[in-house]
Structures are given as C-alpha cells and as structure tokens.
Amino acid sequence: MGSTRESLHGQWSSKWVFILAAAGSAVGLGNIWRFPYVTGENGGGAFVLVYLVCIFLIGIPVMIAELMIGRRGRRSPINAMRLLASEDGLSSGWTVIGYMGIFSGFLILSFYSVVAGWSLAYISYSVSGDLASDLDSSRAVFEALTSSAPRLAFWHTLFMCLVIFVVSNGVTRGLERAVKILMPLLFVSLIAMVIYALLVGDAYKALTYLFYPDFSKLSLDALIVAVGQAFFSLSLGMGALMIYGSYLPQEVSIPSTSVIVGLVDSLVAILAGLAIFPIVFGYGLEVSEGPGLVFVSLAIAFANMPFGDIFGFVFFMLLSIAAWTSAISLLEPVVAWLIETKDWSRPKSSLLSGGIIWMMGLAALLSFNEWSEFAPFGKNIFDWAEFVSTSVLLPAGGLLISIFVGWRLSMFTLSEELNGLRSSLYKAWYVLVKYLAPLGVTLVFIESSGLRGVILGFFAS
Ligand code: PFF
C-alpha cells in the first residue's frame, strides 16, 4: 500500500531512528527554556493544563497530518504541497503553506540561535566556575552576557556554524548518529536535575504552582500563547516535521509514532518545569523573570550543588545539543527546497540560507543591548520575531494544514498513507483534524486578537 515515490534526500534507516529524529526536532529550547518561562508569565497550573489539552487534541492530530503530507509528497514542503494539491485536483494556492513555513523557519531560527548561544555560553561558565550561587549575582552573570553584543554574536555565530555543518552533510546521515545517544542522555540528566531540585528547592510550592489550575490567573492572551507553545514545542506548522516525514519509510505507522513523539515532548517539558520551579521558589526568583528564567535559576542550582560544575557542564551541553537537533529541522525544509528547485548543492544551499538567518539573528541579539530602546508597540525585535512566528505563523500554518487534510485531501490519499481507515482511532483523529483543530485555532485567534468584540458588535447591530 502507499505511494512508491522516493525522496531525493535520503531516508531514515528505521522507525526508531525516525522517532529519535522527530523527538530531536520537538525536544529543544521550546521545552526547557520556553515552556517554563511562558508558564511563569501566564499563571502556572491553568496554563499547563490548557497547554497539554492543546498538545493532545490539536497538536498530535496536526502532527499526523503534517507527517502524512510529507511522506506522500516525498519532497520539500512547498513542492510536496504542490504535488498533493495537483494530484487531488486542488488549487496550487495551497503551496502557500510551504512558503509560509519557510518564512517562519527563518524567523524562528534567527532568535532560536541566539538563545542556543546562551546555552553554549553557559557551558563555558560551568567550565570556568562562573556560575553564581545567589540570585543577584546569577542575574548579573546573565545580564553581563546579554548586554554584550559581541559576546552574543560570538555564540550565535558558533551555533549557526554547527547547524549549517550538519545540514550541509545531509540530515539523515548527520543526525542519525547523534540522536541515538544524546536524546536518552538528556532525559537521564533532566531526571537527575528534577530529583535534586525537589530535594533542595521548594517542592510543595512548585508542585502546586504547576499542577493546581487556578483559572482566575488564565487570561485570554494566555490561550494563544498556549496554542502557539504547543505548535512550537512539537515543531508543527512550518514544515519541519513535513520534511522529516518525507524521509519516513512507507511501512512505519504515522499515528503511533506521532503519539510517542507527543508524549516524549510533553514529558520533557513537564520535567523541565519540575527541575526549574522548585529552585525558582526556593531562591526567591520571580516566576515572570522572562527569557532568562532557566539560565538564572539553574545556574544557582549548579553553583550550590556538589560537583555542580560538572553537572552544569553536562546539562548545558545536552541543552545545546537538544537545541542543535531542533535547529537542524528548522533549516532543512528550505535547504531541501533550494536543492530541488535551484539545483544547488546541499552545502551551497545550507550556507546561503544559514547565512541569511545568521544576519537576521544579529538583529535579534542587538535587541538585548544596542537596540534595546527600539521597541515598537512594546516589543523589541527579538520579542516580535518570537511572537509573530510562534503565536501567529505556526498556529496559522497548523490551521491551513488541518483544513487541507481534513477538508480537501481525497479519501484515497488518506487511506493509502494511514494504512486503511477502519479503526476507531482513525475516526477520532479525523474528527479532531477536520473540526476541532481548525475551530480551536480560529477561536483562539479571534479571542486573543480582540476580534470577538468586533464580531459580536457586528451581529448585534
Ligand atoms: N520544537 C523545537 C523546540 O521545542 O525547541 C523548536 C522548533 C523546531 C519549532 C522546529 C518549530 C520547528 F519547526
């Protein structure tokens, strides 16, 4: 069953390698850096609950849809969309999903690389013994890093070089070896951090904060942040998993692998929360500390624990690697597209697209120092890149993908890619992708953009 097309760019050697690669894309700064800090900014438990609901009811169904499009098309997101649309007699306008994805990928990687650079910098602080043991000094260390444009630029450049290097060598080859060992290691070290944090920090406050949903603290704006965070964390809505799906062997079951990836991703986010919040409460940090939350809080933990320098070194190393495996999946869709359409070599395509992203990253990092005053509508360049990509483009991409798969793609295509359509699980997925995902994302867009008042006013008049 299924199509017999082959990808130009290689194939994963087994189901488990694919799961590790997809988990490698999903698990990254989104789980360990972003999840704790947006949870802190949006009120804790209620936000966590809404986030998990989004993962399971919207994220995983969209992931299945995205992987399916990728495997069916066996090429870059833009060309896969073009091919699937034409095979089912649909408008070529659907390729807009692919173009939007390329744009989101550029935008996301430009700020992602800056934060990954912080993680690299913290590896060096662990080695040099510069992690500070009290709150004020730890904040000062973080501020000294972010206020120096040359330092940020150095780490950002190093990170982009690492990403371009792997993508130049071919993702299926380059990535397979790395993820097999590193993903399990990250998991183990995170568990060690959780145990330590629960023992020495304020476990009770942290557990209540994370798991007791106080809905009075949940704002409407938090809804779109939760949806966006779900898409961001699962690497959805921009074609990253679509391109990984295009390297997926035909016999692998897409639904079961998606559920595994979704579970692993959520587990890592929750573990990150459990590693960070006991320290946050134990040492009197603000939950709404912002993007520096993880770095400031964990550095204190490492500075105070026995063998903390070694632990810190291992942890920031693994965090950087997790960021690396995610960043690779951000660059791959555009590189695959350049190879297919421009007939450029892989190294040339990687260097060129990576170079543009590197330049965009410079603008993002300057917003912490030289350009910090430049903040139209209250957000600097970094904040805008993060907001537009995560809270607007990824959910919009997911919305279009779910409409395309739920409403436009033929039953024939669906049935071939999902190996028959009989099971009740399939039916549940179909309802979620056809109705709940588009409706959920649209409602959240309407609510958070303040359009609800306008629409209600329109009907009332
Ligand atoms: N999922 C990654 C993370 O949680 O860090 C970030 C990411 C990768 C977002 C790839 C989007 C994407 F397409």
Image (spheres, helix red, strand yellow):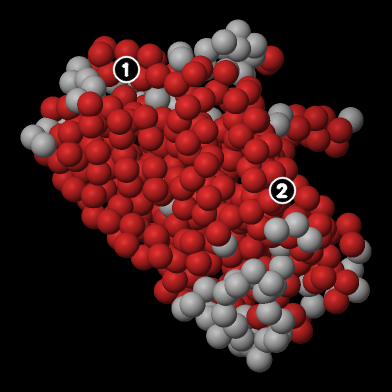
Mark 2 residue crowding within 10 angstroms, few (<14) / some (14–19) / many (20+): many
Distance between mark 1 and mark 2 Cα atoms = 35 Å
Quadrant of the rendered structure where residue 185 is?
bottom left
Quadrant of the rendered structure where residue 304 is?
top left
Dot 2 amino acid type: Ile
Mark 1 residue crowding within 10 angstroms, few (<14) / some (14–19) / many (20+): some
Direction from residue 94 to residue 220 in the image, left or right: left
Q: Residue furthest left?
A: 306
Which residue is at 39% across, 48% downward?
321
Q: Is residue 106 above or below residue 410?
A: above
Regarding mark 1 in the picture, which secondary structure is present there? Answer: helix
* Residue with the mark numbered 1: 141
Looking at the picture, how far across and down is residue 396, in whole percent? 71, 47
Which residue is at 71% across, 29% downward?
450
Which residue is at 63% across, 23% downward?
363
Quadrant of the rendered structure where residue 207 is?
top left
- Name the quadrant of the C terminus: top right
Is 214 or 169 nearer to us in this picture? Answer: 169
* Residue with the mark numbered 2: 102
Direction from residue 342 to residue 331 in the image, left or right: left
Looking at the picture, how far across and down is residue 202, in whole percent? 18, 31
Is 383 or 62 nearer to us in this picture? Answer: 383
- Name the quadrant of the N terminus: bottom right
User: Which callout, 1 or 2, points at the residue further toward the start of the chain?
Assistant: 2
